[in-house]
Amino acid sequence: MKNTSAWEEKAKLLRKWCLVSTTAAGSGHPTSCLSAADIATVLFDKYFTYDVTNPLNIYNDRFVLSKGHAAPLLYALFGMSNAYDLNELKTLRKLNSRFEGHPVPKYKYAEAATGSLGQGLSVGAGLAIAAKRENLPFTTYVLCGDGELAEGQVWEAANFASYHKLNNLVVILDINRLAQSGETMFGHHMNEYEQRFRAFNFRVFNIDGHNFDQIDQALEQAHSHAGLQPVAIIARTEKGKGVSFIENKEGWHGKALKEDELKKALDELGPINDNARFELRKPATTTVPSAEVKINTDIKMDFDNAKSYATREVFGEVLAQITQHTPNMYVLDADVKNSTFTEDALKVTPERFVECFIAEQNMVSVGAGLSRIGKIPVVATFGAFFMRAADQIRMARISEANIKLVGSHVGVSIGEDGPSQMALEDIAFFGALPDVVVLQPCEAVSTASLVPQMVKHNGMVYMRTLRPKTKLLYKPGEEFKIGGSKIVRKSDDDMLTVAATGITVYEALQAADMLKQEDINIRVVDCYSISPIDRETLQDCLHTTHYKCIISVEDHFSHGGLGDFISAAVSAEGVYVEKMAVTHISQSGKQEELLKDAGIDAASIAAKVKELVRSMEQVHSHA
Amino acid sequence: MKNTSAWEEKAKLLRKWCLVSTTAAGSGHPTSCLSAADIATVLFDKYFTYDVTNPLNIYNDRFVLSKGHAAPLLYALFGMSNAYDLNELKTLRKLNSRFEGHPVPKYKYAEAATGSLGQGLSVGAGLAIAAKRENLPFTTYVLCGDGELAEGQVWEAANFASYHKLNNLVVILDINRLAQSGETMFGHHMNEYEQRFRAFNFRVFNIDGHNFDQIDQALEQAHSHAGLQPVAIIARTEKGKGVSFIENKEGWHGKALKEDELKKALDELGPINDNARFELRKPATTTVPSAEVKINTDIKMDFDNAKSYATREVFGEVLAQITQHTPNMYVLDADVKNSTFTEDALKVTPERFVECFIAEQNMVSVGAGLSRIGKIPVVATFGAFFMRAADQIRMARISEANIKLVGSHVGVSIGEDGPSQMALEDIAFFGALPDVVVLQPCEAVSTASLVPQMVKHNGMVYMRTLRPKTKLLYKPGEEFKIGGSKIVRKSDDDMLTVAATGITVYEALQAADMLKQEDINIRVVDCYSISPIDRETLQDCLHTTHYKCIISVEDHFSHGGLGDFISAAVSAEGVYVEKMAVTHISQSGKQEELLKDAGIDAASIAAKVKELVRSMEQVHSHA
């Protein structure tokens, strides 16, 4: 049943609020909202099933605004769906308003924080794959701009969606021709978009995005979930549609109308029914994911004291034990499951394992989508290759996604593969993001204890795992916790403290052995929790060693690593932190050779301890 | 003229060395080399024009090994081209060998460091666009694996190549079906690749990658540069081709043959002519880019003392003045040229401006390609969106690329757009990479002085520019240098030092004014060079203020920022560094509101100074 005049009326009210709110804010992207107003109207008026009183209901359809700068459109859509009073939109972009410049989680109707472009289709694919795997009947709609289709992540997501047969995923492309600084790559050449999405195996509808009949027909067919392909509705639109002096004009990206321009624009729109509303159909069922995460922490692992284990292997085994008994967990990998050992989880819970192939950006944003509906995604690849998804991780953090990222093959200790495969800046990046937990267990027992805690922690966690095998340091049953550390060498006469993490714990212990021969005792701390760092233990060490000095030693670049966390934690008058870390690009070679080459091996640590003790003795003898 | 039996002979020798070198190393990816051996043989034997005595000759054809794990193939190819003795390949993956696990710059025939997948086509596009713009006759060949085609960057590069009509770019796709942990997304369904590259407007040849005739015909046509499209040769191959027990078998990715397996494999290959060689045709002309960078540093800028300027605007104006007189400079932007102000350079040197659209990954790797042939690429986008290309920046650093990256809109001071647009982890990331210079001038005069120095510096530089306008602090002619700083407030009776950078310099000065009213004097330092940090000046401050204390204050997250650089520089007994920085995800709001919300505004600084002075007075009075 067609409803064109009612749609015109509603689209007009949407346009009004996009214009009014941005003018009230004095900034924003009204023209980017107007091009999509007609499509959004038909979607919300006829097809979108949603309970506005219950945004987390897992039976709701999903609307992902990939072009996050069109936030006012999103806010107006849910306002017109009776989620809140439209007048609240006048707080747009003001301090403490839930209506920020780009959507963020305090706005509960946003499926993810967006605003870094090209990520929405991946988030939508994350929502859609959960629905597909768990037989949830909802449809995920993603609204993309045309400029953002230049982002490679969109094509990662497109491959992912068709490979995994996500016929419950509908991407609507708002092809309004104009990007921020000029025309997009393809302007209004609709065939360019059509041929790409067809080649990526989408069901494609090429329509006039301001023709209600065409919009309706495309959405009707998309809504049917016919066949096994995801759907792309490619809509030719005009930026600023509906207001003559901004419509399809360059120079109007990201500009709010001035008061007089707004008046002129509203005059052009003509009489408006301010009471027009979308009456969204509610889903028949309501289920909200539990806020409480129940995970299986009863891990059964027997380690042989005579053997060595790679922490990545232990991670895989423990993960598999947890996923088996934790139905809301998903495991994602980027074609390195036999290196990260997520293949263990694939074996026992294939229904919740998602092969993402070599496309880390999409993988992380799929994780963000899964997190939105209460899943706990564990996402793994080489630590170095998480840098490929740094922006997606940044946005997942802004989205408050509950994601666990596990990076294997960290540091120069990986050996022969060389610098391209070594994660050496990962602690700096993850550590900079507020409240992200960064862990690096150095051996099997602590790994087995920390993996369940990582999964249980509510929020983003990054865990570094090691390629080489390491000896056991701890006994079964010892306690490890986020924010903790372990003193692994101690005497009553320690000169100073060496704080290590991961592979360097072993180098520090070996250095302690070497120094012992020369009657120099040192304290050695295993900082398996890098952030938060165990300030208390480190401060205690400072007070109970001869010198108020900590040497940090880590298989990571010097800036932004463990050493800086320690410095920040104990910084106070009279404390001296010396950082030992990797200071140049490494190379191929054996593990021991590369640790030595980087100056973080046992001999280098022992030499540094002796140098510092000597210099501090001199200072004290002069004092 | 067909030459099949000679090609068979040469391909056999290539295969032998791929197997022998990896077995000698005890690790590596022989099967990934063998699938491409036949194609590479024809390319090098008949089409590749190159002077092995002069890898930097800008008339050489270019061979980019995107699938970097096939490094032994690359090493064998140039060895068989008489660049060095093939026996040197037995040092593969050994410490200090130029033959690393994945190609790095000390191997002079590598166009870029590769090994993080999906970057080679962008590097090739960088080489090809320089050739196109400057009428250099060479052809760029890129060898990609099939697994890496899942990386979105490949499609960014494909769009870029066809948009810019790079008909001098030939990508060879080695479709060997098997990735690391299983079959690729599309296995041997060649049509999947063909339809994608056709949709992205490539001239496509779909061939059997082990049929010398088909290879020859495809390369012949690719070589012709007919039409305006880039070329994709999609070659169906077998992983491990030529050795029955590894050919097209799962479980053989990244595994070297054991000695007995090698013997068996070589037996299978049969008699080999160890003297088979490629006789590469040399280019008719030799020109090597000058190692010395001559740039125009005679910048003419008049600033009005009564006015304020955004550093991003000043950057744009200065950049345009330099590019005009520096013919080897290129400027790249990702559709934000009117925000970063690289549009100024577009106006004066459009022939060396490259619009990369919203595809930051490709942009950075194109920059790496340009750098390889002596260009100086200045690459700009919002600071936040450089995180999209973090892995490409990491690889560009490993490649020793001479790239300048300029990130605008840093920190919470951007205001209403909200957290997705704020660069707040950029210093942590760039600062972690060894020897990368990180600059942040806070006003016009210092910006005008530092931009030419950035361009002149040989190596990677990251400059942060500000969205808001700021007042002049300095007089024309004042000196600024990489590694420098400026004391902007000083008295004989300073209690401590506040070290600021960028927008917080103004907050610190305002705090100094407020404290002055209460008879508290502070030193204020403008740390416009964040890395390297001006250790000397800061240490001098410590010795000439009342307390040995520095407060760092920055519009960046707490970990990995300016504060950690300062801590590391002055760390020693008796020094206290207090970090003031952003500790939570920000929001939309006015600049002043957000600085206050983050606790880095003048009032917060003044309060912190008073708190510290009070506590240190107590410590001293108790002492």
Image (tube, coloured by chain):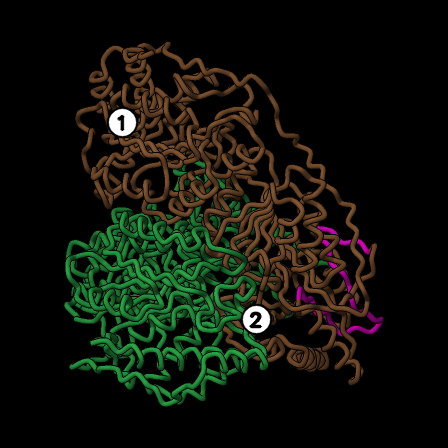
Chain colours: A green, B brown
Asked which quadrant contains residue A588, the reply is top left
Based on the displayed image, in which of its 4 quarters is residue B122 positioned?
top left
Q: In the picture provided, is A234 more to the left or to the right than B263?
A: right
- Relative depth, front residue between B406 and A14: A14
**Which amino acid is tagged 1?**
Gly
Residue A451 marker: none
Chain ID of residue with mark 1? B
Q: Which residue is mark 1?
A: B209
Residue A504 drawn at (x, y percent): 44, 51
Q: Say whether residue A306 is left or right of residue A109.
A: left
Across and down, in percent, residue A574 comes to 64, 67
Q: Callout 2: residue from which chain? A: B
What residue is rendered at 29% in x and 36% in y? Answer: B254
The x, y position of residue A101, in whole percent, is 49, 74
Please report the residue visible at 19 percent of the width from the left and 55 percent of the height from the top. A346
Q: Residue at x 35, y 72 (%)?
A: A38
Quarter of the image with the N terminus of chain B is top left
Dot 2 surroundings within 10 Å: few (below 14), some, or many (20 or more)? many
Q: Which of the two residues, B391 or A555, is positioned nearer the viewer here?
A: B391
* Residue A55, quarter of picture: bottom left
Asked if the magenta segment contains residue B492, the reply would be yes
Indicate whether residue B288 is drawn in magenta. Answer: no
Q: Are marks 1 and 2 on the same chain?
A: yes
Find the magenta span and give its range: B478-502
Q: Earlier in the sequence, mark 1 or mark 2?
A: 1
Q: CA distance from mark 1 to mark 2?
A: 53 Å
Q: In the rendered view, does B492 fall on the left or right side of A372? A: right
Vertical placement of B175 versus B380: above or below? above
Mark 2 highlights which residue? B412
Q: Residues within 10 Å of mark 1 (few under 14, many from 20)?
A: many
Q: Can you say whether A394 is above or below A202 in the image? A: below
